[in-house]
Each structure stands twice: as structure tokens, then as C-alpha cells.
Image (cartoon, rainbow, N blue to C red):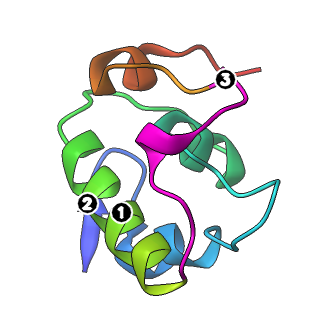
């Protein structure tokens, strides 16, 4: 299923970059970077976040709120607006 029509990203694309561990994307902006693109209109951020939450929970990873490295934005809007490096 296509979740981002601006970048033609599917739910499978999002799930493919979610590998539990230290380098696992923890924000939608990090997922975009992992996939080599950046958010355009931002309407898909909530859907990507939901896919991430479900996939990471199923893999037994810590949820976003439990991130202790201080690198995770508090709001999804900030995550979507995070610039691409």
C-alpha cells in the first residue's frame, strides 16, 4: 500500500528500514532519510509513525518515548520538518 504519494513510498518500504538496533530510525524524518528522500506535503507522517510503532512493537524495540539518547523530537511535526542531511 502506498503511504506517501509524494515520494511513492509503500508500507513495505517503511518496514524495510526498521531493523531493531542502535541505527534503527526512530522518527519519520529518519525513515525518509533511510529511503533517500524527504517529506514534501507531510500528510503521510502520521501513517509512517503508526507503521513504525506497530513494527517496532512487534520486534520488541523500545517505543519513541523511551529514547534516552536525546535525539528524538517531542512532536511529530518537528520530525516531519527536520531537514535532510
Quadrant containing the C terminus is: top right
Vertical relation: 44 (above or below) 76: below
Query: What is the number of the mark on residue 50?
Result: 2
What is the span of residues highlighted in magenta in the rendered image?
60-71
Residue 65 % position (x, y) = 42, 39
Q: Residue at x 53, y 16 (%)?
A: 82
Report the side of 71 relative to 75 (left or right): right
Q: Residue at x 48, y 71 (%)?
A: 56
Instruction: Kindly identify which residue carries mark 3.
Output: 71
Does the residue at mark 3 contact the one at mark 2 (Cβ under 8 Å)? Answer: no
Counting other residues with Cα less than 10 Å from the Cα at mark 2, is it few (<14), some (14-19), or many (20 or more)? few
Q: Tell me which secondary structure the magenta stretch mostly adopts.
A: loop
Residue 12 % position (x, y) = 45, 82
Query: What is the number of the mark on residue 53?
Result: 1
Vertical relation: 78 (above or below) 42: above
Could you give the CA–CA distance between mark 1 and mark 2, rounded to whole angstroms? 5 Å
Could you give the CA–CA distance between mark 3 and mark 2, rounded to whole angstroms? 19 Å
Does the residue at mark 3 contact the one at mark 1 (Cβ under 8 Å)? Answer: no
Residue 18 % position (x, y) = 61, 69
Report the side of 71 relative to 85 (left or right): left
Residue farthest toward the right in the current orientation of the protein: 22
Q: Residue at x 41, y 63 (%)?
A: 52
Vertical relation: 38 (above or below) 58: above
Query: What is the number of the mark on residue 26?
Result: none
First along the sequence among labels 3 and 2: 2
Amino acid at each position: 500500500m502506498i503511504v506517501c504519494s509524494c515520494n511513492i513510498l509503500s508500507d513495505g518500504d517503511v518496514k524495510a528500514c526498521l531493523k531493531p538496533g542502535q541505527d534503527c530510525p526512530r522518527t519519520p524524518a529518519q525513515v525518509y532519510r533511510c529511503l533517500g528522500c524527504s517529506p514534501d506535503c507531510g500528510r503521510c507522517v502520521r501513517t509512517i509513525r503508526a507503521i513504525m510503532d506497530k513494527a517496532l512493537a512487534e520486534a520488541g524495540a523500545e517505543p519513541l518515548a523511551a529514547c534516552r539518547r536525546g535525539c528524538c523530537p517531542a512532536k511529530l511535526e518537528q520530525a516531519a520538518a527536520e531537514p535532510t542531511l
